[in-house]
Image (tube, grey):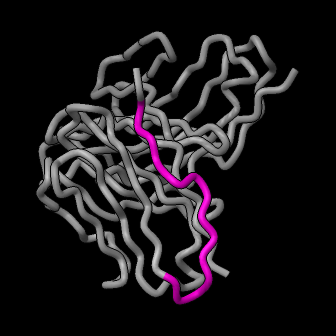
């Protein structure tokens, strides 16, 4: 699976959009980009995933560049409850017998008043 | 609906003791995973079950770690002769399908070995 690079930490004011970048310059054509987040003292939570088209759900939007070498997770109106560590994971579907997730160290997003 | 539950939430063990950590996955979920999370790090894969079959145990750090899921639902992670380096949060996750990267995680068990 392709390696990802994320900033260690970011701040965002409550009510503003939080844009979390992820670099995956070695991604290959059949690899998806998945995002999870982990709120303090909780287990990780699935947010969204995509292959090459932009995706949106009730939690967030995922923007993937045309060359697929990077992506941005957008939380349109961040709240204090969005303070968490956000993990960007690149996954090759259909390989192996276990769909194990390989987390990095993620981006610690702090939402402030 | 009920999510993934784990017990105990916190466990303190003296070095050398055996511990057993329980995971109750979401009912009907085929796949079950165990992950280990050290302080300040992301979770790391330990082992995977598809129903009652343990198909991947490549992440178990030593033969002191043993996991089972005998009836394809509840799973137990056992650590024998605990060492200080076993101190971590142990996370369980389940998913509906055999191959699924949309996994539902429990709150974890924080193990502290003294």
x%, y% of residue B57?
24, 68
Instruction: Name which residue lies at 45% across and 27% down.
Output: A47
- The quarter of the displayed image where residue B67 is located: bottom left
Q: Nearer the viewer, residue A81 or B30?
A: B30
| B57 relative to B105, above or below | below
The residue at the far right in this view is: A113
| B84 relative to B88, above or below | below
Left or right of A33 in this view: A79: right
- The quarter of the displayed image where residue B99 is located: top left
Magenta stretch in the rendered image: B3-17
| A65 relative to B7, above or below | above
| B78 relative to B4, above or below | below
x%, y% of residue B51?
14, 47
Q: Nearer the viewer, residue B80 or A7?
A: B80
Q: Nearer the viewer, residue A7 or A99?
A: A99
Instruction: Name which residue lies at 62% across and 83% down.
Output: B14
Quarter of the picture holding the C terminus of chain A: top right
Q: Is residue B54 magenta?
A: no
Instruction: Name which residue lies at 72% across and 37% down.
Output: A10
Left or right of A95 in this view: B60: right
Q: Report the number of discs.
A: 0
x%, y% of residue B80?
41, 82
Q: Nearer the viewer, residue A76 or B54?
A: B54
Instruction: Name which residue lies at 24% across and 63% down.
Output: B68
Left or right of B108 in this view: B105: left
- The quarter of the displayed image where residue B70 is located: bottom left
x%, y% of residue B109?
54, 56
Q: Is residue B13 magenta?
A: yes
């Amino acid at each position: 699976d392709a390696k990802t690079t994320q900033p260690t930490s970011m701040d965002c004011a409550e009510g503003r959009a939080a844009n979390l970048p992820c670099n995956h310059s070695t991604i290959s054509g059949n690899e998806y980009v998945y995002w999870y987040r982990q709120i303090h003292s909780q287990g990780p939570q699935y947010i969204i995933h995509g292959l090459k088209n932009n995706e949106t759900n009730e939690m967030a939007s995922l923007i993937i560049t045309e060359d697929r070498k990077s992506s941005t997770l957008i939380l349109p109106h961040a709240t204090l409850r969005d303070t968490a560590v956000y993990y960007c994971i690149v996954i090759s579907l259909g390989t192996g017998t276990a769909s194990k997730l390989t987390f990095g160290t993620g981006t610690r997003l702090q939402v402030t008043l | 609906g009920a999510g993934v539950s784990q017990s105990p939430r916190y466990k303190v063990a003296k070095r050398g003791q055996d511990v057993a950590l329980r995971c109750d996955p979401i009912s009907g979920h085929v796949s079950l995973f165990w992950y280990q999370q050290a302080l300040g790090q992301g979770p790391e894969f330990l082992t995977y079950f598809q129903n009652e079959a343990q198909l991947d145990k490549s992440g178990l750090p030593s033969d002191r770690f043993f996991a089972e899921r005998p009836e394809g639902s509840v799973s137990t992670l056992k650590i024998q002769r605990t060492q200080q380096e076993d101190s971590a949060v142990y996370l369980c996750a389940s998913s509906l399908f055999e191959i699924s990267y949309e996994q539902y995680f429990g709150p974890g068990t924080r193990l502290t070995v003294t």
